[in-house]
Amino acid sequence: MEKNSSIRDLKLLGNQITNCKNCPRLAEYIRNVAKIKVKRFIDQEYWGKPLSGFGDPNARLLIVGLAPAAHGGNRTGRMFTGDSSGDWVARALYHNGFATKPTSEHKNDGFALKDAYITAVVRCAPPQNKPTKEEFDACSDFLKQELMILKNIKVVVCLGRISFERCCKLLQIKNKEFSHGKIFEHERFIVICSYHPSRQNTQTKRLGWTAWNRIFEDARRILD
């Protein structure tokens, strides 16, 4: 019964997120990106709407990113899907038993999460990947509601400093500094900090595969 309730509540929340127009700047931006597109995806229909989280309603692992990518999630309609960051996320989750396959390319590709749920602090792709404070605040209740619905979460992985800081604000965590691989206890969760697997981090080698994969090895170890 509890699982069915979670599925229902997540679906209702997902509809609310998809129809959200609280941030005019973001709403206009994602519509324009979906209309103009980029050359390599010119023949594809873009999602072009806010994105809900996705995954296992009984998940014990929650992965929190910053926001959908303009030509990743904003195109495919699923977070961390169809871009290089999504490739890194899918591969690490699969290697550590949290996903059904090591690639996440489009919504109907058979990729599914096991004991994991992926979300973000902002639900629309922002210009220059920089949401404003007002946009962060407008979106914060969605993550709060997800945490209420996902009652089994034990480990929260924050991807990037901004995601970490917003999660700390939501969870009222004080006096904790961000560093890759750092793990600490909250009254309800174990929190793990990680660099975001953006091209900026992976191509410059700031984040290598071993250090990235270790984040999810630690999550698996804690949960097991």
Image (spheres, rainbow, N blue to C red):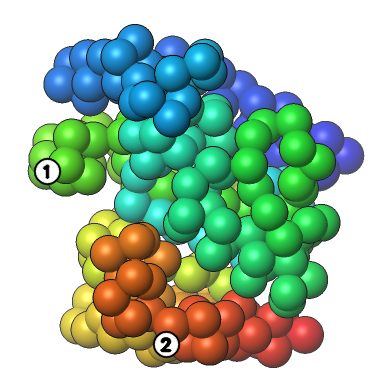
Q: Which residue is pictured at 25% across the width and 69% down the height?
A: 161
Q: Between label 2 and label 1, give the one nearer the viewer.
A: 2
Label 1: how many Cα within 10 Å (few below 14, some 14–19, many 20+): few
- Specify the label residue 133 is tagged with: 1
Looking at the figure, which quarter contains the N terminus?
top right
Q: For residue 197, what is the image quadrant?
A: bottom left
Q: Which residue is mark 2?
A: 181
In this rendered view, identify the residue nearer to me: 130 or 128.
128
**Place of residue 210 in the rendered image (x, y in percent of width and height, measured from the top left):** 53, 88
How many numbered tags mark residues here?
2
Asked whether residue 172 is in view, the answer is no
Q: Amino acid at mark 2?
A: Gly
- Specify the label residue 21 is tagged with: none
**Residue with the most extreme front position:** 39
In this rendered view, identify the residue nearer to me: 89 or 141.
89
**Residue with the most extreme left position:** 133
Q: Secondary structure at mark 2?
A: loop
**Side (left or right) of 212 relative to 162:** right
Looking at the figure, which quarter contains the C terminus?
bottom right
Asked whether residue 100 is in view, the answer is yes
Cα separation, mark 2 vs mark 1, equals: 26 Å
**Place of residue 170 in the rendered image (x, y in percent of width and height, measured from the top left):** 32, 56
Q: Secondary structure at mark 1?
A: helix
Q: Which residue is pictured at 75% across the width and 37% down the height?
A: 109
**Place of residue 118 in the rendered image (x, y in percent of width and height, measured from the top left):** 56, 51
- Examine the rendered structure and indicate whether residue 74 appears above or below residue 92: above
- Examine the rendered structure and indicate whether residue 130 appears above or below residue 97: above
**Side (left or right) of 146 relative to 112:** left
Counting residues from the N terminus, which is met first, the one under dot 2 or under dot 1?
1
**Side (left or right) of 188 relative to 172:** right
Label 2: how many Cα within 10 Å (few below 14, some 14–19, many 20+): some
Q: For residue 40, what is the image quadrant?
A: top left
